[in-house]
């Protein structure tokens, strides 16, 4: 079964979009190098700010007829075809496909409120094209809105990017709790919290080191720790130039950390296990 | 900070991690096997050069040139059949009415002769109802031809099931599927004209014209012609008439085997059917006329092909009758060349016969014809051919 990785955290600025975009590209690149017959990866941007869309496609001029909004508003019968029609190729890599977000998504939440089956409006059409991709990566918005719920319902693996700060780590258990609520409440047995990705780690800050040590020592969270991405100005410069961190500066410490993290996900894709 | 874009180095970075991943099991990602998957119906498309065509020619081209969606193509087919059925006094509103009513015992004894279009829709509806009631047991065979973000699978075998599923989805009540269809996906590099030919010839109901197209595809393939991915006219297949298997002896056995183990002579006859005019081919294909009855038609001038094929259909002529009909002097193409100074003896003979028209009664002529041909159908066919010849001759006289 195709793994669907969703990057989620209701706190903003923790690196969800950066992690989602670079992970999607990394998976495609690694699978291709490994000789996988299908190395296509689909990146779904569910955030109305469309940052992931902007950096991976060079534009965020997507609207009512060519974005995720279009898919969510389509008839159930035509939704999968609409989804296929809205997917665009990323400027980063031919194997990286993007379902773009649109500012209209903000309104979509209101429009869909009260409509039966609204939370499944992404999962349902996605399930029909799932096997065409080696992996799917979903970027979510910084809130537990209907849009995030849709992303989680469509996913198999939730990854929580978190900054090593006190308040963020305190909120970590509540994020995991929310994901488990979705799993139980919406009867999504395939969804699990698959990992924690620590971002913007600065080893010169004592507090960061302390929190990372605590995280590693935690009986539950420690086992979920999948990677630590150092704070690196190359990340923001890469954004500015609409490039992936791998392309912008492969020697940067963040590039290496993301590559290691992606490697772990690719291993899971290959093994089909946890 | 200026853009860096060090594309060449990204590979080094991802490559080093990949190598670590692959340690111990380098083949873990490589999977080139044939797989069975459920695909979205919209991702699947029939092969435009598949010799066995399901839709009538006009719809076939409109669909493959993207002028019609699958639903529109079926809608046009249903309308076409509705007109044909109404003309035959059996109008219907719902496609399900084409199937016999199991509660009506009087239907059992009636052997209604359906037109090819009615038969096609009847068979598709029947198949659709089977899929609805029992599910799609036999998956389609498709080839992955996805490019970029366009995900597409070309049907190698199972086009009828494809159309039946669309029919079921959009025209028949009670469809509860999710718009997916089970398919055996063959990797592009394993797709082959030979396998498609074997699949086609192994099934019953492949018309002689479809066999001729199949033969052409095989001959063109072994001669290195590129098989296009769009709908082609008969002229594409006719290129095979200029080619033979003699220069490709190493493929002869494979080609004949793919054609169902036929003999070389039979293969030549089948390929020769590509000489038929477009209209005659379409008619012969729709009515599934056998090669044995069609082979003689290619001996006469192309402008007569349609007429003769029509006579074969209307009078159900046997191959012997067709042979006799086509052997008639008056239909030899070479004889009709008005630039030749020497008039053919047959033309002179016919011209003389016209002088006897005043001294012969219609009844006598009919009896004489019957005695000569030994069969009323063949006699009627002869008269029709004569009528056509006389009409054309008159046109030459008026025009000159």
Image: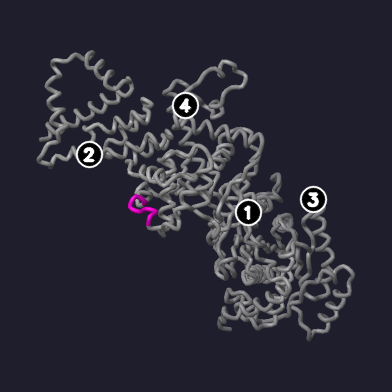
B17 with respect to B325 (left or right): right
- Residues at marks 3 and 4, CA–CA distance in whole angstroms: 52 Å
The reply to whether label 1 and label 2 mark residues of one chain is no
- At mark 2, the secondary structure is helix
Expressed as whole percent of the image width and height from the top left, the position of residue B319 reads 37, 31
The reply to whether label 3 and label 4 mark residues of one chain is no
Point out the tag, 3 or 1, that comes first from the N-terminus: 1
Q: Which residue is mark 2?
A: B333
Point out the tag, 2 or 4, that comes first from the N-terminus: 4
Q: Which residue is mark 4?
A: B114
Expressed as whole percent of the image width and height from the top left, the position of residue B205 reads 49, 37
Foreground label between 3 and 4: 4
Tell me the quarter of the image containing the N terminus of chain B: bottom right
Q: Which residue is mark 1?
A: A129
- Residues at marks 1 and 4, CA–CA distance in whole angstroms: 40 Å
Q: Callout 4: residue from which chain?
A: B
- Residues at marks 2 and 4, CA–CA distance in whole angstroms: 35 Å
Foreground label between 1 and 2: 2
Q: Which residues are magenta?
A: B240-246
Q: Callout 1: residue from which chain?
A: A
């Amino acid at each position: 079964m195709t793994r669907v990785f969703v990057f989620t955290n209701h706190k903003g600025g923790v690196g969800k979009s950066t992690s989602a975009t670079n992970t999607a590209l990394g998976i495609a690149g690694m699978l291709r190098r490994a000789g996988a017959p299908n190395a296509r990866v689909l990146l779904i941007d569910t955030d109305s700010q469309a940052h992931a869309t902007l950096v991976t496609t060079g534009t965020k001029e997507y609207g009512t007829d060519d974005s995720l909004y279009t898919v969510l508003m389509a008839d159930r019968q035509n939704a999968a075809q609409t989804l296929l029609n809205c997917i665009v190729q990323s400027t980063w890599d031919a194997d990286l496909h993007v379902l773009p977000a649109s500012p209209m998504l903000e309104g979509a939440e209101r429009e869909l409120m009260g409509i039966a089956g609204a939370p499944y409006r992404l999962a349902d059409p996605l399930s029909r094209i799932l096997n065409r991709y080696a992996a799917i990566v979903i970027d979510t918005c910084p809130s537990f809105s209907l849009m995030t719920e849709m992303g989680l319902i469509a996913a198999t693996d939730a990854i929580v990017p978190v900054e090593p700060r006190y308040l963020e780590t305190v909120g970590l258990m509540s994020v995991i709790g929310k994901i488990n609520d979705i799993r139980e409440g919406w009867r999504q047995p395939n969804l699990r919290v698959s990992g924690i990705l620590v971002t913007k780690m600065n080893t010169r800050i004592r507090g960061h080191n302390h929190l990372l040590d605590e995280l590693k020592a935690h009986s539950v969270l420690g086992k979920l720790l999948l990677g630590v991405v150092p704070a690196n100005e190359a990340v923001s410069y890469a954004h500015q130039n609409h490039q992936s961190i791998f392309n912008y500066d492969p020697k940067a410490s963040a590039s290496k950390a993301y590559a290691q993290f992606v490697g772990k996900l690719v291993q899971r894709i290959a093994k089909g296990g946890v | 900070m200026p853009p860096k874009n060090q594309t060449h180095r990204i590979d080094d970075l991802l490559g080093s991690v990949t190598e670590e991943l692959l340690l111990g099991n380098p083949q873990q990602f490589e999977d080139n096997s044939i797989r069975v998957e459920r695909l979205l119906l919209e991702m699947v498309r029939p092969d435009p050069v598949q010799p066995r065509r399901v839709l009538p020619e006009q719809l076939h081209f409109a669909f493959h040139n993207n002028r019609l969606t699958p639903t529109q193509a079926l809608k046009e087919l249903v309308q076409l059949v509705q007109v044909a059925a109404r003309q035959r006094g059996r109008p219907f509103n719902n496609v399900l009415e084409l199937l016999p009513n199991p509660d009506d015992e009087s239907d059992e004894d009636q052997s209604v002769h359906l037109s090819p279009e009615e038969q096609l829709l009847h068979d598709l509806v029947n198949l659709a109802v089977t899929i609805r009631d029992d599910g799609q047991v036999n998956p389609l065979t498709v080839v992955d031809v996805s490019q970029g973000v366009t995900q597409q699978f070309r049907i190698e075998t199972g086009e009828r099931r494809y159309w039946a599923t669309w029919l079921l989805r959009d025209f028949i009540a009670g469809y509860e599927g999710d718009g997916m269809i089970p398919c055996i996906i063959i990797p592009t590099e394993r797709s082959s004209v030979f396998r498609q030919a074997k699949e086609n010839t192994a099934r019953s109901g492949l018309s002689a014209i479809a066999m001729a197209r199949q033969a052409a595809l095989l001959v063109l393939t072994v001669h290195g012609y590129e098989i296009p991915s769009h709908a082609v006219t008969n002229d594409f297949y006719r290129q095979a008439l200029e080619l033979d298997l003699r220069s490709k002896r190493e493929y002869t056995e494979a080609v004949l085997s793919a054609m169902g183990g036929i003999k070389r002579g039979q293969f030549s006859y089948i390929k020769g059917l590509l000489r038929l005019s477009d209209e005659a081919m379409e008619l012969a294909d729709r009515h599934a006329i056998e090669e044995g009855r069609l082979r003689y038609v290619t001996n006469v001038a192309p402008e007569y092909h349609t007429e003769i094929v029509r006579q074969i259909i209307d009078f159900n002529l046997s191959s012997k009758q067709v042979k006799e009909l086509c052997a008639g002097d008056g239909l030899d193409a070479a004889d009709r060349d008005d630039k030749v100074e020497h008039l053919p003896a047959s033309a002179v003979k016919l011209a003389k016969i016209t002088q006897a028209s005043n001294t012969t009664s219609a009844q006598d002529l009919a009896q004489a014809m019957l005695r000569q041909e030994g069969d009323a159908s063949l006699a009627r066919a002869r008269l029709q051919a004569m009528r056509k010849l006389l009409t054309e001759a008159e046109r030459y006289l008026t025009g000159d």
